């Protein structure tokens, strides 16, 4: 584990020499007392992509608590669920799965069809479920968030902020510790399928124990990541990285920064998720589409070049572009690696 962490750090240093700065909102906080340890553009709106599914899971947990669903109960695949774009399980119309397996597929596989299946099971329709998502967001104090679907597929009006996602993550940790295992699963089996998590921190960072990744072209690569050491749980929110490895490295750097500075920062009584003021110039949603090295997003793939003998051997395959936990004007650190959903 230590060796892997060193590889992530080395990847950040290597890519800093060549990568242009592309900054997205970030926030780091202590889940115990909601104290903010680092924040950058935390109230700028952003497209959540599959981080939407954190709210989908939270509302489903509410329904389980209310007795509307049971973990062993089965839910069906409708035509609407079947029609969703990948990532998906691909169940045929009329097929069923248990709520427990559905939640696992939602979180580990980030299955868009399963998100709709859960929405319809909880509220009868995706539209009614989305209304409940927005009501829940308002109750949790997510003041700059709006949901229009249950899975995070591209929709111009579907927006959130790093602070709002932090409030949601804090609510998940506080209200539903009995479901903590779902967020830390490395893989899930559904029939003959073995589905693996996109959260690179779970296998590369000491203490990592959740939560969820997300990607669409407009959002770039997003992650809400949790880690626990010596009884303290920190949560990092990273939005708008240009690669899957980049979000992993950025989140790892933020968490490491937090664990190293947690005690002395407490002496200065940092602001909390609730007391930190919203800047008057907080921005609306941006797009990362032209910054993503993919023809699917309209960008250009990086030009391949021959490697010298031994070059890049110490860099983890999962490492990517990152920016260090410091102000953008003073931060040029990035890391590079292959794409990841």
Image: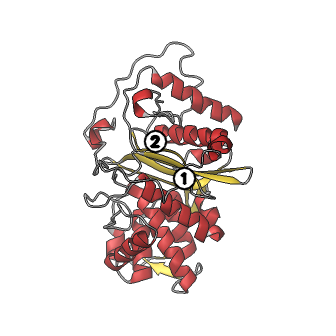
* Mark 1, residue position: 197
Q: How many marks?
A: 2
C-alpha gap between disc 2 and disc 1: 12 Å
- Residue 34 rendering spot, x and y as whole percentages: 57, 57
Asked if residue 74 is positioned above or below residue 113 in the image, the reply reads below
Q: In the figure, is residue 296 to the left or right of 92?
A: left
Q: Could you say which is closer to the camera, residue 313 or residue 257?
A: 257
Q: Residue furthest front?
A: 268
Quadrant of the rendered image containing residue 9: top right
Q: What is the crowding at mark 2: few (fewer than 14 residues within 10 Å), some, or many (at least 20)?
A: many
Q: Is residue 190 visible?
A: no
Q: In the figure, is residue 340 to the left or right of 283?
A: right
Asked if residue 114 is positioned above or below residue 322 in the image, the reply reads below
Q: Residue furthest top?
A: 308
Q: What is the crowding at mark 1: few (fewer than 14 residues within 10 Å), some, or many (at least 20)?
A: many
Q: In the figure, is residue 17 to the left or right of 193?
A: left
What element does badge 1 sit on? loop
* Mark 2, residue position: 244
- Residue 171 rendering spot, x and y as whole percentages: 54, 66
What element does badge 2 sit on? helix
Q: Of marks 2 and 1, which one's residue comes earlier in the chain?
A: 1
Quadrant holding the N terminus:
top right
- Residue 33 rendering spot, x and y as whole percentages: 61, 58
Q: Residue furthest bottom?
A: 67
Q: In the figure, is residue 336 to the left or right of 174?
A: left
């Amino acid at each position: 584990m230590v060796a892997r962490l060193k590889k992530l750090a080395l990847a950040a240093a290597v890519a800093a020499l060549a990568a242009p700065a592309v900054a997205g909102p970030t926030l780091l906080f202590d889940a115990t007392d909601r104290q903010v340890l680092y924040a950058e553009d935390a109230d700028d709106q952003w497209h959540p992509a599959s981080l939407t599914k954190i709210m989908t899971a939270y509302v489903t947990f509410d329904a389980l608590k209310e007795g509307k669903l049971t973990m062993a109960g089965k839910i069906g695949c409708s035509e609407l669920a079947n029609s969703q774009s990948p990532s998906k399980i691909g169940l045929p119309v009329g097929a069923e799965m248990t709520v427990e397996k559905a939640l696992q597929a939602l979180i580990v596989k980030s299955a868009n069809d399963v998100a709709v299946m859960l929405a319809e099971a909880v509220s009868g329709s995706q539209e009614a479920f989305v209304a409940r998502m927005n009501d829940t967001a308002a109750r949790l104090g997510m003041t700059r968030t709006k949901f229009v679907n249950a899975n995070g597929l591209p929709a111009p009006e579907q927006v959130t902020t790093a602070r709002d996602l932090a409030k949601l993550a804090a609510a998940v940790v506080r209200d539903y510790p009995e479901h903590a295992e779902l967020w830390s699963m490395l893989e899930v089996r559904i029939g003959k399928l073995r589905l693996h998590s996109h959260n690179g921190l779970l296998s590369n960072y000491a203490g990592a124990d959740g939560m969820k990744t997300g990607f669409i072209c407009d959002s770039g690569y997003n992650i809400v990541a949790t880690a626990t050491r010596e009884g303290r749980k920190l949560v990092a929110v990273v939005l708008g990285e240009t690669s899957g490895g980049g979000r992993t490295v950025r989140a790892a750097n933020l968490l490491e920064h937090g664990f190293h500075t947690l005690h002395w920062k407490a002496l200065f009584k940092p602001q909390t998720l609730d007391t930190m003021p919203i800047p008057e110039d907080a921005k609306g949603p941006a797009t990362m589409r032209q910054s993503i090295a993919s023809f699917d997003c309209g960008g250009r793939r990086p030009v391949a070049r021959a490697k010298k003998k031994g070059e890049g051997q110490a860099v983890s395959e999962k490492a990517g572009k990152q920016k260090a936990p410091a102000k953008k004007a003073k931060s040029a650190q990035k890391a590079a690696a292959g794409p990841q959903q």
